[in-house]
Image (cartoon, rainbow, N blue to C red):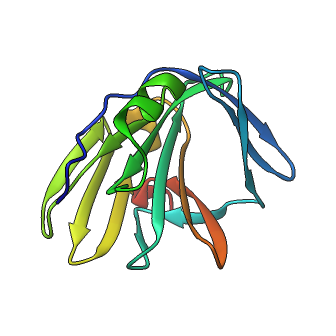
């Protein structure tokens, strides 16, 4: 895909608020994912060409791990200094990010499937680009 590599995530701070989701990187910077996430049962399909970030919280919902999917813009060193992970998928490739959370590349679209009970936390997917952002919280398909 490029000269970029998979990068394992570290645990980062998470704050769930009415207005959205805050994450605190290992370098003490904070990012904000705006808006109340849309509930999705089973699988969310993100639009091709969008930046896709997957956040899985711990049971306390104060910490979590954040992984960028197919991000080719961010240098490995930046990801490593912030605690954010990255996974690179070829078209039609699938990978289990964490127990209960699977990502797959369907052409240029990214699909994320999750079972939060197996993941032992809440699972959020953020899709964004310079034109806007959408956020989702995944629930087990059996809960629908």
Q: In percent of the image, x 40 and y 29: which residue is there?
A: 77
Q: Position of residue 7 (x, y in %)?
A: 30, 33
Q: In percent of the image, x 76 and y 59: which residue is there?
A: 36
Q: In percent of the image, x 46 and y 71: which residue is there?
A: 50
Q: Is residue 123 above or below residue 141?
A: above
Left or right of residue 80, residue 91 in this image: left
Q: Nearer the viewer, residue 97 or 71?
A: 71
Q: Position of residue 140 (x, y in %)?
A: 44, 53
Q: Is residue 139 above or below residue 6?
A: below
Q: How many dots with numbers?
A: 0
Q: Which quadrant of the view contains residue 15? A: top right
Q: Is residue 142 above or below residue 77?
A: below
Left or right of residue 98, residue 125 in this image: right
Q: Position of residue 2 (x, y in %)?
A: 19, 56
Q: Position of residue 87 (x, y in %)?
A: 28, 45
Residue situated furthest right in the rendering:
18
> What is the quadrant of the N terminus in the image?
bottom left
Q: Which quadrant of the view contains residue 133? A: bottom right
Left or right of residue 36, residue 136 in this image: left
Q: Nearer the viewer, residue 110 or 24?
A: 24
Q: Nearer the viewer, residue 30 or 4?
A: 4
């Amino acid at each position: 895909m490029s000269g970029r590599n998979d990068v394992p995530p570290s645990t980062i701070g998470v704050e769930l608020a009415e207005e959205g989701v805050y994450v605190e990187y290992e370098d003490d910077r904070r990012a904000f994912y705006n808006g109340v996430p849309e509930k999705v049962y089973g699988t969310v399909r993100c639009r091709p060409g969008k930046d896709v970030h997957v956040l899985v919280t711990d049971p306390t919902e104060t910490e979590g791990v954040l992984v960028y999917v197919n991000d080719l813009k961010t240098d490995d060193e930046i990801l490593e200094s912030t605690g954010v992970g990255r996974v690179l998928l070829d078209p039609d490739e699938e990978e289990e990010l964490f127990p209960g959370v699977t990502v797959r590349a369907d052409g240029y679209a990214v699909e994320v499937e999750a079972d939060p009970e197996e993941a032992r936390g809440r699972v959020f997917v953020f899709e964004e680009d310079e034109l806007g952002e959408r956020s989702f919280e995944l629930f087990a398909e059996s809960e629908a």
